[in-house]
Amino acid sequence: MVQRATWFGDRAVHVQATSPAEREAIASSLDRQLPAALIRRGMASVLIESPTPEPELLMTVELALRAIEPSQTQSPELDEVRMDVVYNGADLAATADFFHITRRDLIGAHTSQTWRVAMMGFAPGFGYLEPCDDLLLPWASLPRRDNPRAQVPTGSVAIAAGMSAVYPSSSPGGWHLLGATATKLFDATDPENPALLRSGQRVRFFALDHPSHP
Amino acid sequence: MSIPADHVPIATVERAGLVTVQDLGRFGFTDVGVPTSGAWHRERHHLAVALVRDDMQDSNEPSPSLEILSTELSLAFHEPQVIAIVGSAFVRIDGHNAATDVAFLVHADTQLDIEHRGPGPAYVALSGWQPALTLGSAATDSFSRLGGPTADGSPIAPGQTLLGAPAIGTVTERIGSFLRAIQPAPSSLSMIAVDHDLADRFCGESWRVDASARSGIRLSGPRIHAPRPIPSMPVVPGAIQLAPDGTAIVLGPDGGLTGGYPIVGVVASAHLDRLADYSIGDELRFARTDPVSACEQFSAREQRLSSMIIRPAALN
Protein backbone atom coordinates (compact mmCIF):
# COMPACT_ATOMS: atom_id res chain seq x y z
CA MET A 1 0.00 0.00 0.00
CA VAL A 2 2.08 2.91 -1.28
CA GLN A 3 0.75 6.39 -0.55
CA ARG A 4 2.52 9.68 -0.98
CA ALA A 5 2.43 11.85 2.15
CA THR A 6 3.03 15.54 1.38
CA TRP A 7 3.19 18.66 3.51
CA PHE A 8 -0.01 20.74 3.68
CA GLY A 9 1.42 23.91 5.25
CA ASP A 10 3.72 23.65 8.28
CA ARG A 11 1.39 21.85 10.65
CA ALA A 12 -0.50 19.33 8.48
CA VAL A 13 0.29 16.45 6.14
CA HIS A 14 -1.92 15.30 3.26
CA VAL A 15 -2.21 11.67 2.13
CA GLN A 16 -4.00 10.82 -1.12
CA ALA A 17 -6.27 7.75 -1.13
CA THR A 18 -7.30 5.93 -4.27
CA SER A 19 -10.59 4.56 -2.91
CA PRO A 20 -12.95 5.03 0.04
CA ALA A 21 -11.77 1.69 1.43
CA GLU A 22 -8.12 2.79 1.26
CA ARG A 23 -9.03 6.14 2.85
CA GLU A 24 -10.71 4.27 5.72
CA ALA A 25 -7.76 1.92 6.16
CA ILE A 26 -5.31 4.83 6.29
CA ALA A 27 -7.44 7.02 8.55
CA SER A 28 -8.38 4.33 11.05
CA SER A 29 -4.79 3.10 11.30
CA LEU A 30 -3.41 6.62 11.77
CA ASP A 31 -6.13 7.26 14.38
CA ARG A 32 -4.58 4.47 16.42
CA GLN A 33 -0.93 5.17 15.68
CA LEU A 34 -0.93 8.98 16.10
CA PRO A 35 -3.22 9.79 19.04
CA ALA A 36 -1.74 13.29 19.47
CA ALA A 37 -2.61 14.33 15.91
CA LEU A 38 -6.08 15.09 14.51
CA ILE A 39 -6.90 12.69 11.69
CA ARG A 40 -9.34 14.37 9.28
CA ARG A 41 -10.85 12.59 6.30
CA GLY A 42 -11.52 14.04 2.87
CA MET A 43 -13.54 12.33 0.17
CA ALA A 44 -10.36 10.86 -1.34
CA SER A 45 -7.68 11.88 1.14
CA VAL A 46 -6.67 12.02 4.78
CA LEU A 47 -5.26 15.14 6.50
CA ILE A 48 -3.11 14.70 9.59
CA GLU A 49 -3.22 17.96 11.56
CA SER A 50 -1.05 19.07 14.51
CA PRO A 51 -2.13 22.05 16.67
CA THR A 52 1.19 23.86 16.10
CA PRO A 53 3.92 23.66 13.41
CA GLU A 54 5.84 20.40 13.75
CA PRO A 55 8.98 19.83 11.59
CA GLU A 56 8.90 16.05 12.18
CA LEU A 57 5.25 15.62 11.14
CA LEU A 58 5.89 14.39 7.57
CA MET A 59 8.40 11.77 8.69
CA THR A 60 6.12 10.63 11.52
CA VAL A 61 3.26 10.12 9.05
CA GLU A 62 5.47 8.31 6.52
CA LEU A 63 6.64 5.88 9.20
CA ALA A 64 3.05 5.28 10.31
CA LEU A 65 1.92 4.66 6.73
CA ARG A 66 4.54 1.95 6.31
CA ALA A 67 3.09 0.20 9.33
CA ILE A 68 -0.29 -0.25 7.60
CA GLU A 69 -0.45 -3.81 6.25
CA PRO A 70 -2.15 -4.12 2.85
CA SER A 71 -4.67 -6.57 4.30
CA GLN A 72 -5.93 -3.86 6.62
CA THR A 73 -8.44 -2.43 4.18
CA GLN A 74 -11.62 -2.30 6.13
CA SER A 75 -12.19 0.24 8.92
CA PRO A 76 -12.76 -0.98 12.47
CA GLU A 77 -16.38 -1.77 13.28
CA LEU A 78 -17.64 1.43 14.93
CA ASP A 79 -21.16 0.66 16.05
CA GLU A 80 -23.71 1.43 13.35
CA VAL A 81 -25.86 4.51 13.91
CA ARG A 82 -29.58 4.08 13.32
CA MET A 83 -31.73 7.11 12.55
CA ASP A 84 -35.54 7.12 12.47
CA VAL A 85 -36.78 9.42 9.73
CA VAL A 86 -40.19 10.85 8.82
CA TYR A 87 -39.97 10.86 5.04
CA ASN A 88 -42.06 13.95 4.28
CA GLY A 89 -39.31 16.17 2.89
CA ALA A 90 -40.11 19.09 0.55
CA ASP A 91 -38.15 17.46 -2.30
CA LEU A 92 -39.27 13.85 -1.81
CA ALA A 93 -41.70 13.85 -4.76
CA ALA A 94 -39.42 15.73 -7.14
CA THR A 95 -36.48 13.46 -6.28
CA ALA A 96 -38.58 10.32 -6.87
CA ASP A 97 -39.56 11.75 -10.26
CA PHE A 98 -35.88 12.41 -11.02
CA PHE A 99 -35.12 8.73 -10.51
CA HIS A 100 -38.38 7.76 -12.33
CA ILE A 101 -39.58 5.75 -9.35
CA THR A 102 -42.35 6.10 -6.78
CA ARG A 103 -41.80 7.87 -3.46
CA ARG A 104 -42.23 4.50 -1.72
CA ASP A 105 -39.41 3.03 -3.81
CA LEU A 106 -37.17 6.04 -3.15
CA ILE A 107 -37.74 5.66 0.61
CA GLY A 108 -37.15 1.93 0.25
CA ALA A 109 -33.82 2.47 -1.50
CA HIS A 110 -32.66 5.18 0.90
CA THR A 111 -33.46 3.06 3.95
CA SER A 112 -32.04 -0.18 2.49
CA GLN A 113 -28.78 1.44 1.42
CA THR A 114 -26.01 1.27 4.04
CA TRP A 115 -24.24 4.61 4.36
CA ARG A 116 -20.84 5.45 5.87
CA VAL A 117 -19.51 8.78 7.20
CA ALA A 118 -16.86 9.65 4.63
CA MET A 119 -15.96 13.12 5.88
CA MET A 120 -17.04 15.66 8.51
CA GLY A 121 -17.29 19.35 7.76
CA PHE A 122 -19.70 22.07 6.56
CA ALA A 123 -21.12 22.45 10.11
CA PRO A 124 -20.48 21.00 13.58
CA GLY A 125 -21.59 17.36 13.58
CA PHE A 126 -22.31 17.36 9.80
CA GLY A 127 -21.23 14.09 8.17
CA TYR A 128 -21.03 13.50 4.42
CA LEU A 129 -22.43 9.96 4.08
CA GLU A 130 -21.29 7.87 1.11
CA PRO A 131 -23.17 4.71 0.03
CA CYS A 132 -21.29 1.51 0.82
CA ASP A 133 -21.86 -2.04 -0.44
CA ASP A 134 -23.82 -2.15 -3.73
CA LEU A 135 -25.65 0.96 -4.92
CA LEU A 136 -29.44 0.63 -4.74
CA LEU A 137 -29.91 3.78 -6.87
CA PRO A 138 -27.51 5.80 -9.08
CA TRP A 139 -27.25 8.32 -6.25
CA ALA A 140 -24.40 10.25 -7.90
CA SER A 141 -26.56 11.14 -10.90
CA LEU A 142 -28.60 13.58 -8.74
CA PRO A 143 -26.80 16.97 -8.70
CA ARG A 144 -27.12 19.56 -5.92
CA ARG A 145 -30.15 21.89 -6.18
CA ASP A 146 -29.66 24.79 -8.59
CA ASN A 147 -30.61 27.28 -5.89
CA PRO A 148 -29.67 26.28 -2.35
CA ARG A 149 -32.23 27.12 0.35
CA ALA A 150 -31.25 29.89 2.75
CA GLN A 151 -32.57 27.75 5.61
CA VAL A 152 -33.27 24.04 6.06
CA PRO A 153 -34.80 22.73 9.28
CA THR A 154 -32.68 21.04 11.95
CA GLY A 155 -32.55 17.28 11.41
CA SER A 156 -33.30 17.50 7.68
CA VAL A 157 -32.26 14.30 5.84
CA ALA A 158 -31.04 15.19 2.37
CA ILE A 159 -29.23 13.74 -0.64
CA ALA A 160 -27.14 15.13 -3.50
CA ALA A 161 -24.04 14.36 -5.56
CA GLY A 162 -23.97 10.70 -4.55
CA MET A 163 -24.15 11.39 -0.83
CA SER A 164 -26.61 11.62 2.04
CA ALA A 165 -26.47 13.97 5.02
CA VAL A 166 -28.39 15.03 8.08
CA TYR A 167 -28.30 18.74 8.99
CA PRO A 168 -27.36 18.95 12.71
CA SER A 169 -28.84 22.46 12.96
CA SER A 170 -30.90 24.68 10.71
CA SER A 171 -28.53 26.25 8.18
CA PRO A 172 -28.36 27.04 4.47
CA GLY A 173 -28.71 23.84 2.42
CA GLY A 174 -28.31 23.00 -1.24
CA TRP A 175 -29.33 19.32 -1.10
CA HIS A 176 -32.67 17.64 -1.79
CA LEU A 177 -34.78 17.25 1.37
CA LEU A 178 -36.25 13.73 1.73
CA GLY A 179 -37.39 13.94 5.34
CA ALA A 180 -36.33 14.78 8.88
CA THR A 181 -35.13 13.01 12.00
CA ALA A 182 -35.48 13.96 15.65
CA THR A 183 -32.08 12.39 16.39
CA LYS A 184 -29.73 14.98 17.91
CA LEU A 185 -26.48 15.08 15.94
CA PHE A 186 -24.54 17.72 17.80
CA ASP A 187 -24.44 18.87 21.43
CA ALA A 188 -22.13 21.83 22.06
CA THR A 189 -22.53 21.36 25.83
CA ASP A 190 -20.79 17.96 25.78
CA PRO A 191 -17.07 18.53 25.26
CA GLU A 192 -16.34 14.79 25.69
CA ASN A 193 -18.53 13.71 22.82
CA PRO A 194 -20.27 16.61 21.03
CA ALA A 195 -20.97 14.84 17.73
CA LEU A 196 -23.09 11.72 17.25
CA LEU A 197 -21.38 10.75 13.98
CA ARG A 198 -17.74 9.81 13.64
CA SER A 199 -15.82 9.43 10.37
CA GLY A 200 -15.83 5.84 9.14
CA GLN A 201 -19.03 4.98 11.00
CA ARG A 202 -21.90 3.20 9.22
CA VAL A 203 -25.36 4.78 9.22
CA ARG A 204 -28.78 3.29 8.47
CA PHE A 205 -32.04 5.21 8.03
CA PHE A 206 -35.38 3.76 9.09
CA ALA A 207 -38.75 5.12 7.87
CA LEU A 208 -40.70 5.98 11.01
CA ASP A 209 -44.22 5.91 9.71
CA HIS A 210 -45.40 3.40 7.16
CA PRO A 211 -45.45 5.73 4.18
CA SER A 212 -48.86 5.78 2.54
CA HIS A 213 -47.17 7.24 -0.51
CA PRO A 214 -48.23 5.64 -3.75
CA MET B 1 -24.37 27.65 30.44
CA SER B 2 -24.42 28.11 34.18
CA ILE B 3 -22.65 31.19 35.56
CA PRO B 4 -20.24 30.55 38.48
CA ALA B 5 -21.57 31.92 41.80
CA ASP B 6 -18.69 34.35 42.39
CA HIS B 7 -19.19 36.05 39.02
CA VAL B 8 -20.36 39.62 39.00
CA PRO B 9 -20.84 42.19 36.21
CA ILE B 10 -17.39 43.64 35.47
CA ALA B 11 -18.41 46.00 32.66
CA THR B 12 -21.37 46.76 30.39
CA VAL B 13 -21.08 47.20 26.63
CA GLU B 14 -22.28 50.68 25.68
CA ARG B 15 -21.32 50.82 22.01
CA ALA B 16 -19.74 48.16 19.78
CA GLY B 17 -18.85 47.97 16.11
CA LEU B 18 -17.82 44.52 14.85
CA VAL B 19 -16.37 43.21 18.12
CA THR B 20 -16.25 39.52 19.11
CA VAL B 21 -15.16 37.53 22.14
CA GLN B 22 -12.06 35.52 21.22
CA ASP B 23 -9.28 33.38 22.74
CA LEU B 24 -6.87 30.87 21.20
CA GLY B 25 -9.80 28.78 19.91
CA ARG B 26 -11.33 25.31 20.24
CA PHE B 27 -8.78 22.52 19.94
CA GLY B 28 -9.40 18.91 19.04
CA PHE B 29 -12.77 19.11 17.26
CA THR B 30 -11.87 19.71 13.60
CA ASP B 31 -12.50 16.01 12.95
CA VAL B 32 -16.18 16.38 13.97
CA GLY B 33 -16.85 19.56 12.00
CA VAL B 34 -15.94 22.21 14.58
CA PRO B 35 -13.24 24.68 13.45
CA THR B 36 -10.61 26.03 15.87
CA SER B 37 -11.63 29.67 15.22
CA GLY B 38 -10.14 32.06 17.83
CA ALA B 39 -8.31 35.38 17.53
CA TRP B 40 -7.42 36.37 13.97
CA HIS B 41 -4.25 38.23 14.98
CA ARG B 42 -2.85 35.70 17.47
CA GLU B 43 0.13 37.86 18.44
CA ARG B 44 -1.87 40.93 19.46
CA HIS B 45 -4.41 38.77 21.32
CA HIS B 46 -1.59 36.98 23.18
CA LEU B 47 0.19 40.21 24.14
CA ALA B 48 -2.98 41.97 25.35
CA VAL B 49 -3.87 39.00 27.57
CA ALA B 50 -0.31 38.47 28.80
CA LEU B 51 -0.11 42.14 29.90
CA VAL B 52 -3.05 41.78 32.32
CA ARG B 53 -3.00 38.13 33.32
CA ASP B 54 -0.67 36.15 35.49
CA ASP B 55 1.65 33.68 33.87
CA MET B 56 -0.14 32.38 30.79
CA GLN B 57 1.12 28.83 30.72
CA ASP B 58 -0.27 27.36 33.89
CA SER B 59 -3.80 28.68 33.64
CA ASN B 60 -5.89 26.00 31.95
CA GLU B 61 -8.79 28.43 31.61
CA PRO B 62 -8.41 30.03 28.18
CA SER B 63 -7.73 33.76 28.51
CA PRO B 64 -10.22 35.84 26.49
CA SER B 65 -9.95 39.14 24.68
CA LEU B 66 -12.34 41.37 22.75
CA GLU B 67 -11.34 41.48 19.07
CA ILE B 68 -12.23 44.85 17.51
CA LEU B 69 -12.48 44.50 13.72
CA SER B 70 -14.24 47.77 13.02
CA THR B 71 -15.39 51.15 14.27
CA GLU B 72 -15.51 51.28 18.08
CA LEU B 73 -16.02 49.77 21.51
CA SER B 74 -17.23 51.57 24.65
CA LEU B 75 -17.41 49.88 28.06
CA ALA B 76 -18.77 51.19 31.37
CA PHE B 77 -16.93 49.51 34.30
CA HIS B 78 -18.62 48.36 37.51
CA GLU B 79 -15.51 46.85 39.11
CA PRO B 80 -11.85 47.90 39.21
CA GLN B 81 -9.90 46.05 36.51
CA VAL B 82 -6.42 45.92 35.08
CA ILE B 83 -6.86 46.29 31.32
CA ALA B 84 -4.71 46.57 28.19
CA ILE B 85 -5.35 47.38 24.55
CA VAL B 86 -3.00 46.12 21.83
CA GLY B 87 -3.41 47.22 18.24
CA SER B 88 -4.00 50.39 16.29
CA ALA B 89 -6.70 52.38 18.17
CA PHE B 90 -7.40 55.67 19.98
CA VAL B 91 -8.11 54.98 23.65
CA ARG B 92 -9.85 57.34 26.09
CA ILE B 93 -10.53 56.77 29.82
CA ASP B 94 -13.28 59.10 31.06
CA GLY B 95 -12.46 61.29 28.09
CA HIS B 96 -8.67 61.45 28.72
CA ASN B 97 -6.30 59.96 26.16
CA ALA B 98 -4.72 56.69 27.26
CA ALA B 99 -2.02 54.52 25.74
CA THR B 100 -2.09 51.13 24.05
CA ASP B 101 0.43 48.35 24.73
CA VAL B 102 0.44 48.96 28.50
CA ALA B 103 -1.52 47.49 31.42
CA PHE B 104 -3.35 50.10 33.52
CA LEU B 105 -5.89 50.16 36.31
CA VAL B 106 -9.45 51.38 35.76
CA HIS B 107 -11.78 52.02 38.71
CA ALA B 108 -15.46 51.20 39.01
CA ASP B 109 -17.67 53.74 37.16
CA THR B 110 -14.92 54.37 34.61
CA GLN B 111 -15.89 54.85 30.93
CA LEU B 112 -13.55 53.30 28.34
CA ASP B 113 -13.91 54.47 24.73
CA ILE B 114 -11.88 52.81 21.98
CA GLU B 115 -11.92 54.11 18.40
CA HIS B 116 -10.54 51.51 16.01
CA ARG B 117 -7.96 52.86 13.51
CA GLY B 118 -6.57 49.65 11.99
CA PRO B 119 -5.36 48.26 9.71
CA GLY B 120 -6.12 44.99 11.35
CA PRO B 121 -7.87 44.06 14.57
CA ALA B 122 -7.16 45.60 18.01
CA TYR B 123 -7.53 43.54 21.20
CA VAL B 124 -8.80 44.43 24.68
CA ALA B 125 -7.96 42.23 27.67
CA LEU B 126 -9.49 42.57 31.16
CA SER B 127 -7.88 40.91 34.18
CA GLY B 128 -11.01 39.43 35.81
CA TRP B 129 -13.34 38.82 32.86
CA GLN B 130 -14.33 35.15 32.37
CA PRO B 131 -16.83 34.56 29.53
CA ALA B 132 -18.82 31.33 29.25
CA LEU B 133 -17.06 28.54 27.33
CA THR B 134 -18.47 26.39 24.51
CA LEU B 135 -16.44 23.20 23.93
CA GLY B 136 -13.65 24.60 26.08
CA SER B 137 -13.35 28.01 24.42
CA ALA B 138 -15.10 31.39 24.34
CA ALA B 139 -14.05 31.95 20.71
CA THR B 140 -16.84 33.40 18.56
CA ASP B 141 -17.10 31.35 15.39
CA SER B 142 -19.47 32.95 12.90
CA PHE B 143 -19.04 29.97 10.53
CA SER B 144 -20.30 27.28 12.90
CA ARG B 145 -22.34 29.68 15.05
CA LEU B 146 -20.64 28.76 18.30
CA GLY B 147 -19.40 30.89 21.19
CA GLY B 148 -19.87 34.56 21.92
CA PRO B 149 -22.10 36.10 24.62
CA THR B 150 -25.26 34.44 23.25
CA ALA B 151 -23.42 31.18 22.42
CA ASP B 152 -24.51 31.32 18.77
CA GLY B 153 -21.47 32.89 17.15
CA SER B 154 -22.75 36.46 17.16
CA PRO B 155 -20.65 39.54 18.03
CA ILE B 156 -21.11 41.46 21.31
CA ALA B 157 -23.96 43.96 21.45
CA PRO B 158 -24.69 47.09 23.49
CA GLY B 159 -26.38 46.28 26.80
CA GLN B 160 -24.56 42.99 27.33
CA THR B 161 -22.44 42.68 30.48
CA LEU B 162 -19.02 41.08 30.79
CA LEU B 163 -19.01 38.82 33.83
CA GLY B 164 -16.08 37.60 35.88
CA ALA B 165 -14.43 37.32 39.27
CA PRO B 166 -13.83 40.89 40.45
CA ALA B 167 -10.75 40.16 42.63
CA ILE B 168 -7.90 42.14 41.11
CA GLY B 169 -5.61 41.84 44.16
CA THR B 170 -3.54 39.16 42.54
CA VAL B 171 -2.88 41.15 39.39
CA THR B 172 -2.07 44.64 40.71
CA GLU B 173 1.58 43.90 40.11
CA ARG B 174 0.67 43.71 36.40
CA ILE B 175 -0.16 47.41 36.41
CA GLY B 176 2.44 49.24 34.35
CA SER B 177 3.51 46.20 32.38
CA PHE B 178 4.37 47.27 28.88
CA LEU B 179 5.60 45.86 25.59
CA ARG B 180 9.21 45.91 24.52
CA ALA B 181 8.96 47.01 20.89
CA ILE B 182 10.70 44.17 19.08
CA GLN B 183 9.87 44.47 15.41
CA PRO B 184 10.03 41.08 13.61
CA ALA B 185 12.64 41.02 10.85
CA PRO B 186 10.86 42.14 7.68
CA SER B 187 10.14 39.19 5.40
CA SER B 188 7.81 38.55 2.53
CA LEU B 189 4.60 36.67 3.20
CA SER B 190 5.72 33.02 3.20
CA MET B 191 3.66 30.17 1.83
CA ILE B 192 4.34 26.44 1.57
CA ALA B 193 3.47 25.04 -1.87
CA VAL B 194 0.88 22.28 -2.22
CA ASP B 195 0.61 22.38 -6.04
CA HIS B 196 4.17 23.32 -6.98
CA ASP B 197 3.44 24.45 -10.52
CA LEU B 198 0.48 26.59 -9.42
CA ALA B 199 2.51 27.94 -6.47
CA ASP B 200 5.33 29.15 -8.74
CA ARG B 201 2.89 31.03 -10.97
CA PHE B 202 0.97 32.34 -7.93
CA CYS B 203 4.12 33.65 -6.21
CA GLY B 204 5.28 35.26 -9.43
CA GLU B 205 2.38 37.70 -9.41
CA SER B 206 1.15 40.61 -7.30
CA TRP B 207 -2.35 40.22 -5.87
CA ARG B 208 -4.90 42.83 -4.79
CA VAL B 209 -7.19 42.43 -1.77
CA ASP B 210 -10.85 42.50 -2.89
CA ALA B 211 -12.48 41.48 0.39
CA SER B 212 -11.32 40.79 3.94
CA ALA B 213 -13.18 39.10 6.80
CA ARG B 214 -12.56 36.46 9.45
CA SER B 215 -13.67 33.88 6.87
CA GLY B 216 -10.69 34.88 4.71
CA ILE B 217 -9.32 37.38 2.25
CA ARG B 218 -10.16 37.28 -1.45
CA LEU B 219 -7.41 38.26 -3.86
CA SER B 220 -7.72 39.17 -7.52
CA GLY B 221 -4.87 39.33 -9.97
CA PRO B 222 -3.80 37.97 -13.34
CA ARG B 223 -5.84 35.04 -14.52
CA ILE B 224 -4.13 31.82 -13.48
CA HIS B 225 -5.73 28.86 -15.20
CA ALA B 226 -7.26 26.85 -12.34
CA PRO B 227 -7.27 23.08 -12.74
CA ARG B 228 -10.57 21.21 -12.28
CA PRO B 229 -12.16 21.29 -8.81
CA ILE B 230 -10.89 18.45 -6.57
CA PRO B 231 -12.83 16.01 -4.38
CA SER B 232 -13.76 17.90 -1.23
CA MET B 233 -10.87 17.78 1.26
CA PRO B 234 -10.09 19.12 4.73
CA VAL B 235 -8.45 22.56 4.80
CA VAL B 236 -6.78 24.73 7.42
CA PRO B 237 -6.66 28.51 7.98
CA GLY B 238 -4.06 29.96 5.61
CA ALA B 239 -4.93 27.54 2.80
CA ILE B 240 -4.85 29.37 -0.54
CA GLN B 241 -7.66 28.20 -2.83
CA LEU B 242 -7.97 29.07 -6.51
CA ALA B 243 -11.61 29.76 -7.39
CA PRO B 244 -12.95 28.95 -10.89
CA ASP B 245 -13.15 32.70 -11.67
CA GLY B 246 -9.38 33.00 -11.18
CA THR B 247 -9.57 34.82 -7.84
CA ALA B 248 -7.71 33.35 -4.88
CA ILE B 249 -9.10 32.90 -1.37
CA VAL B 250 -6.80 32.71 1.65
CA LEU B 251 -8.86 31.08 4.41
CA GLY B 252 -9.19 32.88 7.74
CA PRO B 253 -10.04 31.45 11.19
CA ASP B 254 -13.76 31.24 10.27
CA GLY B 255 -13.05 29.91 6.78
CA GLY B 256 -14.62 26.51 7.19
CA LEU B 257 -13.14 23.02 7.32
CA THR B 258 -13.52 21.55 3.84
CA GLY B 259 -13.05 22.82 0.32
CA GLY B 260 -13.34 21.64 -3.25
CA TYR B 261 -11.24 24.31 -4.99
CA PRO B 262 -7.67 23.47 -6.02
CA ILE B 263 -5.16 24.38 -3.30
CA VAL B 264 -2.12 26.47 -4.32
CA GLY B 265 -0.39 26.30 -0.94
CA VAL B 266 -0.75 27.23 2.72
CA VAL B 267 0.51 30.43 4.37
CA ALA B 268 3.22 29.79 6.99
CA SER B 269 1.68 29.73 10.50
CA ALA B 270 4.06 32.48 11.66
CA HIS B 271 2.56 34.81 9.00
CA LEU B 272 -1.15 34.07 9.42
CA ASP B 273 -1.46 37.12 11.68
CA ARG B 274 -0.33 39.43 8.92
CA LEU B 275 -3.30 38.42 6.76
CA ALA B 276 -5.56 40.15 9.30
CA ASP B 277 -3.89 43.51 8.61
CA TYR B 278 -4.56 43.78 4.89
CA SER B 279 -7.32 46.12 3.75
CA ILE B 280 -9.31 46.24 0.54
CA GLY B 281 -7.11 47.61 -2.25
CA ASP B 282 -3.79 46.54 -0.72
CA GLU B 283 -1.32 44.77 -2.98
CA LEU B 284 0.60 41.74 -1.73
CA ARG B 285 2.98 39.09 -2.95
CA PHE B 286 3.87 35.69 -1.56
CA ALA B 287 7.23 33.92 -1.48
CA ARG B 288 7.70 30.18 -1.27
CA THR B 289 9.30 28.65 1.78
CA ASP B 290 9.78 25.08 2.94
CA PRO B 291 7.90 23.58 5.90
CA VAL B 292 10.94 23.17 8.14
CA SER B 293 11.99 26.82 7.72
CA ALA B 294 8.37 27.80 8.36
CA CYS B 295 8.47 25.82 11.63
CA GLU B 296 11.65 27.68 12.61
CA GLN B 297 9.97 31.02 11.78
CA PHE B 298 7.09 30.00 14.06
CA SER B 299 9.26 29.09 17.04
CA ALA B 300 11.30 32.28 16.54
CA ARG B 301 8.07 34.23 16.81
CA GLU B 302 7.04 32.34 19.95
CA GLN B 303 10.44 33.21 21.48
CA ARG B 304 10.05 36.88 20.54
CA LEU B 305 6.54 37.00 22.03
CA SER B 306 7.63 35.57 25.36
CA SER B 307 10.35 38.24 25.71
CA MET B 308 8.17 41.22 24.79
CA ILE B 309 6.39 41.70 28.13
CA ILE B 310 8.22 43.92 30.66
CA ARG B 311 6.88 43.79 34.19
CA PRO B 312 7.41 46.90 36.32
CA ALA B 313 8.85 44.78 39.13
CA ALA B 314 11.64 43.77 36.76
CA LEU B 315 12.74 47.41 36.53
CA ASN B 316 13.57 48.19 40.14
Image (cartoon, coloured by chain):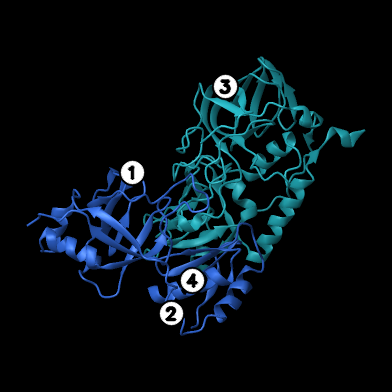
Chain colours: A blue, B cyan
Instruction: Using the image, tell me which numbered label, if any, was put on residue A28.
Output: 4
Instruction: Identify the image quadrant of residue B9.
Output: top right
Q: Which chain carries label 1?
A: A
Q: Mark 1 points at which residue?
A: A170
For the residues tagged 2 and 3, is the chain the same? Answer: no
Q: Mark 2 points at which residue?
A: A73
Q: How far apart are marks 2 and 3 (CA)?
A: 57 Å
Which mark is nearer the camera, 4 or 3? Answer: 4
Can you give x and y, in whole percent of width and height, for residue B25 in the image? 57, 46
Kindly check if marks 4 and 3 are in contact, taking CB atoms under 8 A apart as contact.
Answer: no
Can you give x and y, in whole percent of width and height, for residue B65 in the image? 62, 36
Left or right: where A178 falls relative to B152: left
Kindly check if marks 2 and 4 are in contact, taking CB atoms under 8 A apart as contact.
Answer: no
Q: What element carries label 3?
A: strand
**Which kind of residue does numbered mark 2 sit on?**
Thr
* Nearer the observer, A214 or B92: A214
**Which kind of residue does numbered mark 1 sit on?**
Ser
